[in-house]
Image (cartoon, helix red, strand yellow):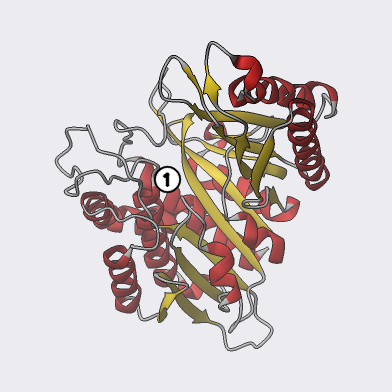
């Protein structure tokens, strides 16, 4: 089949299942589940994959699911993994939708309901097009992306084996990208989201006699200020890095100097060497300032997900595929990486992978993720299905 007919077939098959994909998205949205509690969502995904005749494996690293479509008898045939995350957030939904969350204090405020629906739709389309490619597909439904992450745990439990995965694809619905537009970028694409908690331990006392205390509040303030000089004076200006102290707690009244202060911060970077440099300098700043004022401290520094680094060849396959099915004017290369984090990065550490954005922002708007009014139009789901389906076929036929 020539390329034009192939594109037409993808679009026709997607149109046939669009209503079902939307219905699945609504069902997931109405029944959101927090990280590693995605039992209903995982069961839905497993059920839909079994209906398609795929080899389903459940309860991987908690609630993870894989569905394998063996579409080749050749032992050397390539295998492509396509991933979606399933978890919701502890946010009270304020949207007035016909499919509004039924669970108080829990909602899909980041688009994972759409990711899961798109993956199920992609599986349905590719099953119908089995004669158009020779290779194996592994559809992966992942828990826990919003918290400690499920990707690494699922990999450790063998999801890249039997058959061995050769490459991976993933997407994220993105609120600052225009609706229906695909954004891609080779190389560093999203940051490593590290964090730390710092307890400064001083000596409390009466606010009128500060000379008899070791006040943790100005110590904390000085640390916060000094941390910013790491970015401006220790990191190459052409590199990307962020240190944001987002929580500072100390004291409970106006006339008592507290004994302790607590700081919580996020640290973001795109490159391994910058990541290490940030951690080293943060630890030095904290130690030196606490030593100067005679305070003790307890530091818990946590390295989070690695940065998402997109493989050039897989990224090119994705970009070309998107142009074929949604048009040149709706596909664009990002100039800069995003400083948000994503544990899809673990797949990229193991096999050539690419992760891309599908826009959900209506004209002249920005949709804020993790907010109580987060929402997007169902019309973008079909774009996700056609792009992912075309990219899969191009991977096998390249």
Up-down: is 179 above or below 319? above
- Residue 314 appears left or right of 325: right
Say which element carries label 1.
helix
Q: Name the residue under label 1.
A: 383
Percent across and percent down for residue 69 are 47, 78
Residue at (55%, 27%) from the top-left corner?
204
Residue 7: in sight, yes or no?
yes
Residue 1: in sight, yes or no?
no
Quadrant housing the C terminus? bottom right
Percent across and percent down for residue 382 are 37, 48
Number of residues whose C-alpha sits closer than 10 Å to that of mark 1, classed few (under 14), some (14–19) or many (20 or more): many
Residue at (52%, 34%) from the top-left corner?
330
Residue lying at the far left in this picture: please name it: 98
Identify which residue, 170 or 368, lies in the foreground: 368
- Residue 277 appears left or right of 261: right
Residue at (62%, 35%) from the top-left corner?
200
Up-down: is 238 above or below 301? above
Up-down: is 389 above or below 277? below
Percent across and percent down for residue 82 are 52, 63
Up-down: is 321 above or below 215? below
């Amino acid at each position: 089949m020539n390329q034009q007919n192939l594109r037409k077939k993808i679009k026709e098959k997607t149109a046939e299942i669009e209503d079902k994909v939307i219905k699945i998205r609504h069902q997931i949205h109405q029944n959101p589940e927090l990280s590693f509690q995605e039992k209903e969502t995982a069961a839905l995904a497993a059920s839909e994959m079994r209906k398609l005749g795929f080899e389903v494996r459940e309860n991987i690293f908690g609630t993870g699911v894989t569905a394998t479509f063996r579409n080749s008898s050749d032992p050397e045939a390539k295998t492509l993994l396509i991933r979606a995350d399933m978890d919701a957030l502890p946010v009270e939904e304020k949207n007035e939708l016909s499919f509004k969350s039924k669970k108080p204090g829990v909602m899909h405020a980041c688009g994972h309901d759409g990711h899961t629906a798109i993956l199920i739709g992609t599986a349905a389309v590719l099953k119908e097009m089995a004669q158009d490619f020779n290779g194996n597909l592994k559809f992966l439904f992942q828990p826990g992306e919003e918290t400690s992450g499920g990707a690494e745990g699922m990999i450790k439990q063998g999801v890249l084996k039997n058959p061995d995965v050769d490459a991976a694809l993933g997407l994220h619905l993105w609120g600052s990208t225009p609706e229906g537009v695909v954004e891609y970028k080779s190389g560093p694409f999203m940051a490593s989201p590290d964090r730390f908690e710092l307890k400064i331990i001083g000596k409390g006392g009466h606010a009128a006699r500060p000379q008899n205390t070791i006040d943790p509040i100005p110590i904390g303030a000085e640390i916060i200020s000094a941390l910013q000089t790491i970015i401006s004076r220790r990191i190459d200006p052409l590199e990307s890095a962020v240190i944001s102290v987002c929580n500072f707690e100390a004291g409970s009244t106006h006339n008592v100097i507290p004994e302790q202060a607590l700081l919580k911060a996020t640290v973001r970077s795109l490159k391994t060497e910058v990541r290490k440099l940030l951690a080293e300098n943060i630890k030095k700043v904290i130690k030196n300032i606490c030593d100067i004022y005679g305070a003790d401290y307890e530091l818990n520094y946590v390295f989070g997900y690695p940065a998402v680094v997109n493989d050039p060849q897989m990224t090119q396959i994705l970009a070309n595929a998107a142009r074929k099915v949604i048009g040149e004017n709706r596909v664009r290369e990002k100039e800069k990486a995003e400083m948000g984090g994503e544990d899809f990065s673990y797949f990229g550490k193991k096999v050539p992978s690419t992760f891309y954005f599908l826009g959900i922002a209506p004209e002249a708007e920005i949709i804020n993720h993790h907010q109580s009014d987060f929402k997007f139009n169902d019309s973008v789901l079909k774009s996700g299905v056609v792009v992912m389906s075309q990219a899969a076929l191009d991977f096998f036929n390249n």
